[in-house]
């Protein structure tokens, strides 16, 4: 299983609230699994038996609807994946796919539930995470339905720069089709608006490489939708 949970460099702030005996219990009931880019970590419709903690890498959370795939969000470490499903109806309501090489910790769900009962601080931190996730979901839903495609695409480019890569120059980890699935539009619309942004001197595009040249303008587009 590799590094003990006590000394794991990827340990979550939630787990830091556990005592030594609880950490030992967690350490004895988890396994670390490596996934390659494109691998499925969770499949929609399958039975959920583990809590999943993302240690390394980037993933997409996506749902297959009646007509097409919808990307709910992208997630980076350190974060738990699939908590609402695990504590809900036990059937995975969405899929999680690796966007690059990932390292994931699978934790026995029964042990995790017992830790929630034993540690008030741990439970509180997990509840806070679930609340933040729900609020973020509401915000994303409102943006998708009320903003124009230009505003939603600006949001995506800024999100990559500010929250995922912490740089105004980066390689987009998903295709233009997947960006369309993320903001409810077509690949053609994504390509067209990226070209418009480039013509306006806001970004520079080379393949999947993006450089934000005028962040202030992109922020205005994001704000005004």
Image (cartoon, rainbow, N blue to C red):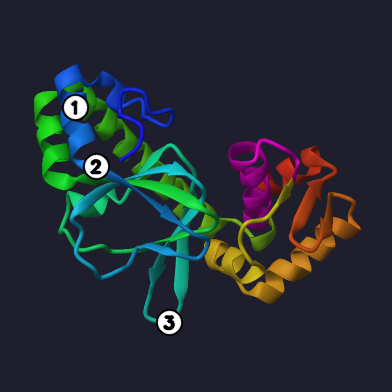
Residue 98, position as x, y percentages in the image: 48, 58
User: Dot 2: within a 10 Å radius of its alpha carbon, few (fewer than 14), some, or many (20 or more) residues?
Assistant: many
For the residue pair 111 and 69, the one nearer the viewer reads as: 111
User: Dot 3: within a 10 Å radius of its alpha carbon, few (fewer than 14), some, or many (20 or more) residues?
Assistant: few
Q: Is mark 2 on a helix, strand or loop?
A: strand
Quadrant location of the N terminus in the rendered image: top left
Please name the residue shown 76% across and 64% down the image: 193
Q: Is mark 3 on a helix, strand or loop?
A: loop
Side of 72 where 224 appears, left or right = right
Q: Which is nearer the N-term, disc 3 or disc 2?
A: 2
Q: Is residue 2 above or below residue 175?
A: above
Report which residue position mark 2 lands on: 30
User: Dot 1: within a 10 Å radius of its alpha carbon, few (fewer than 14), some, or many (20 or more) residues?
Assistant: some
Distance between the alpha carbons at the discs numbered 3 and 2? 37 Å
Report which residue position mark 1 lands on: 24
Side of 223 where 99 appears, left or right = left
Distance between the alpha carbons at the discs numbered 3 and 1? 46 Å
Q: What element carries label 1?
A: helix
For the residue pair 159 and 38, the one nearer the viewer reads as: 38
Question: Magenta residues: mostly which secondary structure?
Answer: helix
């Amino acid at each position: 299983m590799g590094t003990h949970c006590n000394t794991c460099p990827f340990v979550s702030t939630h787990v830091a609230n556990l005592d030594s005996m609880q950490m030992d219990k967690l350490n004895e009931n988890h396994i670390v699994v490596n996934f390659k880019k494109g691998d499925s970590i969770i499949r929609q419709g399958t039975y959920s038996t583990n809590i999943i903690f993302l240690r390394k890498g980037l993933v997409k959370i996506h749902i297959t609807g009646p007509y097409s795939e919808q990307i709910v969000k992208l997630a980076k470490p350190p974060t738990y994946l699939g908590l609402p499903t695990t504590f809900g109806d036990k059937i995975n309501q969405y899929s999680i796919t690796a966007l690059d090489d990932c390292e994931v910790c699978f934790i026995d769900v029964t042990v995790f539930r017992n830790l929630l009962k034993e540690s008030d601080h741990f439970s509180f931190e997990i509840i806070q995470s679930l609340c933040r996730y729900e609020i973020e979901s509401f915000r994303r839903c409102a943006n998708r339905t009320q903003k124009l495609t230009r505003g939603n695409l600006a949001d995506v480019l800024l999100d990559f720069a500010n929250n995922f890569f912490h740089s105004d120059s980066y390689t987009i980890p998903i295709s233009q089709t997947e960006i369309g699935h993320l903001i409810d539009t077509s690949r053609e619309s994504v390509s067209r608006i990226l070209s418009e942004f480039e013509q306006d001197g806001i970004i520079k595009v080379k393949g999947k490489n993006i450089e934000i040249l005028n962040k202030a303008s992109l922020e205005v587009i994001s704000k005004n939708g």
